[in-house]
Image (cartoon, helix red, strand yellow):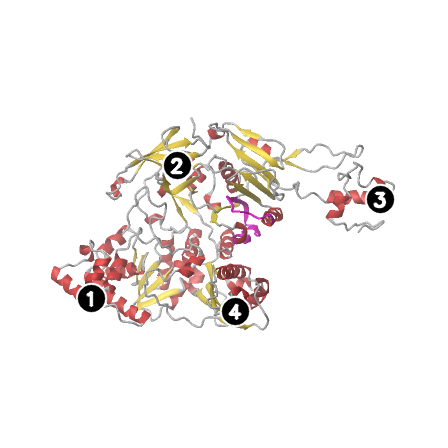
Amino acid sequence: MVSNGATTLHMDPLTSLLSDKRIRTASGARANDHQKTQSDCQNDQQNDCQNSYQNARYKNPQEVNLCFGIKGLDDFFANFIDTSPDTSSGEYPASSPKGHGLAFGTLLEMGIPFGNGGRRLLALLLAAATRGACDAQKHWCLWISARQQPAVYPPAWQALGVDLNRLRFASSECPVGDLRAVFLDDFFRVIIIDHPNGLKPDEHIFLAQCARRHQKIIVVARDTHLSASDSNTAARYRLNVSRPARQNILELLPVRGLHRSLRLSSFFQHPNFKIFP
Amino acid sequence: MKSILPLTSALSDTSKPSLFLGIRTDVSDGGQFLSLTPKVMKWSEDTYLLDLTSVHLYWTQLAREVGLSFVEYLSSILSELTAANTSITLASHPWHALLLLCVAADRPTLNFIDAQSHLGRKLLQDTTWAHWISRCHELRDHFMEYSGKDTFGSLVSLSKTINRLQFTHVSQMSDIDSPAMHRRFGKLAATAWRWTWSSSQSEKKSHTNQSSLFEKIDQKTFGDNFPWLNIAVKESPSVSRHIETHLRHWDHISPLLSEDLDKLCNLTCWTSNERVVSLEWVLSFSCSPSLRIPVLFRHPHPLHRESGHHKTALLQAFHCWQRANSSQKKPEKPGDTYISDDSITDWTLTVRDRLMMDPQIRSIFKDDLSQDSSKLQRLENSLPVPLIEYWTSDHYCPEYSFEQQTQSHRETNSKMIAFDNIAKIATHQRRPLFIYQNPQKPQDQDQSSGLIFSERVATTWWSEESSNKNTCRDYYIRMTDDGLLQWVFQNDDGTFRVHGIYG
């Protein structure tokens, strides 16, 4: 409820969003055009409330990001923050990048067909997290998989830079049901769910909430490419990782949340992955 | 008797960790050994057996905190608990621990023997028939006490046969298998013979906490009916509750269970220094038979520290409750009901196994882990699945280049060939992130096209069984037509196998 002349407005987030100037009616008119004649004090207070509420999708400027260690990839996940609208035009400027890498508090869904080499990206992420490459803070990581065979080969992970002392593996067909305590705890900051068997929509929402609340990075890696028609709205980013036939290029194709694709040329000639001459 | 498995066999599970202690001591009761493990058995007047299965991970982590191996830490604790002239053996099976104690009696300078060490293996091979038959007589007494029956026969004919053949050591009859022993000399001899020659390949049953906790519930003791009988301990803390209302859902059960856990902590028959290894929760229903739900903790859990909320215990109880509900059988008779539809009338909560830390031991070997380790143990105690940690070793063979945390005897494993660190990293960088435990046959017909040579790996041919002809493997990277990046190898005989996938 808005109280006239009150210094403090108790406004629920839904109300503040509805009065947001970015929300337009079907005729294109601004939602609150008819209220232009109301007191300036009330409008200022509304703007203050709007600025105090941020869309949950956008990162907190105080967040620390986790970098992969590959410049192109870190730029790819560079975060954007809201800025205030231009007072003269009322338009919002183009978002400007802030920071590099993947922000904590993110649920990321990736479609990586098993065997195309794309999971090396996740291993690099774990290497950055466990070694403290970005923020000099070493994080505990967890890899959850329902896949029994083939099993992980830890020496290869270690050779990519992963600190095995800070990485744990769990096998579960129902990761959210069995390992709920892990998601609700602050201990593991990076959690990868590999090849989940049928995550339900409410479980996606749960994962997103846990990621935000406990400042985790949660990655759901599926064995098939994602489709835009999938109804997972909880993930901040959704992207597919593919490798063109017989080429040493890894392509990251956004499905939602990102606005450009990325080609990592010579990915398999990366110093950490020299398998081709 | 440990042997190196051939290349194409299982990964990393090449030896069972030693989890059984045999102790010869002149103490009157084995109460002080309950500081190490809740499972202590009095084998004879001067011999005790300890089962470290449920507490192995806990002691291993404590040892790591102070930079010691599991064996070193264990021996230092035992040196505080026991007198100087005590003989201690460590083995993967209680029978081996007992046999080694006999052998150690003839060598008083050896007071701690690990059966998986080179010396331990040699000493086991030196087991005499006199020692073996003596232990069999004791085993027979225990079987009779355990089962109440005397159906195991005697060893008279075996003794006569050995005297006639003038054999002195059991290794002289190592070619005879257990079924032959059973036919000639009866069930007792066959059972003891099978334990004597049990190999790491034949006994794949895991006694470690790496298996799901629920599998331990379904297993019999050791899976081979060793007549284990724990020593009597002082009163087990227990509380009971009678339910007057219809109670079926976990949301209604958990507050009452939390209250009962608090009551359990307030009982005076145990102290806050003790740690719970397992609880037993027995529920009675109005129409269905009673249900016994074991609540197991992966690490000894300090129940008193969570008084007021008992978050960890409740989470673990919830998982056990769910499993019990999901595994219920269909009603046998028309009038019977599913347990899930039935109402709980009362329950009893008992601390079944606990670690009773001796104050002397507690003051010397502080059981407080680092903050991260404590948090990790607390998390593991609230999960139904284990959190696996891997270690890498300096071995070029993929199968032997890593192991899970349960295999704490890295220092007693067969000699690993030294591997230069830089070379190791360079080699592993070219290997895939995922490998098959048993290399697979390639799906497509054309196996030799599109191969890029990666490395050649030679086997430890000098310790392999003669049936294995392949002494080296040539590894290749192969890209299939559908874009799959495989790690394949070619044997000496030209056959290809898919060993890994570049995730």
Mark 4 → mark 2, Cα distance in angstroms: 59 Å
Asked if residue B108 is positioned above or below residue B440 in the image, the reply reads below
Residue that label 2 marks: B443
Label 1: how many Cα within 10 Å (few below 14, some 14–19, many 20+):
some
Magenta residues (range): A178-201
Q: Position of residue B447 (x, y in %)?
A: 36, 32
Name the one closer to the observer, B367 or A196.
Answer: A196
Q: Position of residue A19 (x, y in %)?
A: 78, 43
Residue that label 4 marks: B264
Q: At label 1, which amino acid type do we have?
A: Leu
Are dots 3 and 4 on a single chain?
no
Residue drawn at x 26%, y 58% as measured from the top left: B194
Q: Is residue B168 left or right of residue A207?
A: left
* SS at circle 1: loop
Are dots 2 and 1 on a single chain?
yes
The verdict on residue A192 being magenta is yes
Foreground tag (3 vs 1): 1
Are dots 2 and 3 on a single chain?
no
Report in which chain the residue with disc 4 lies.
Answer: B
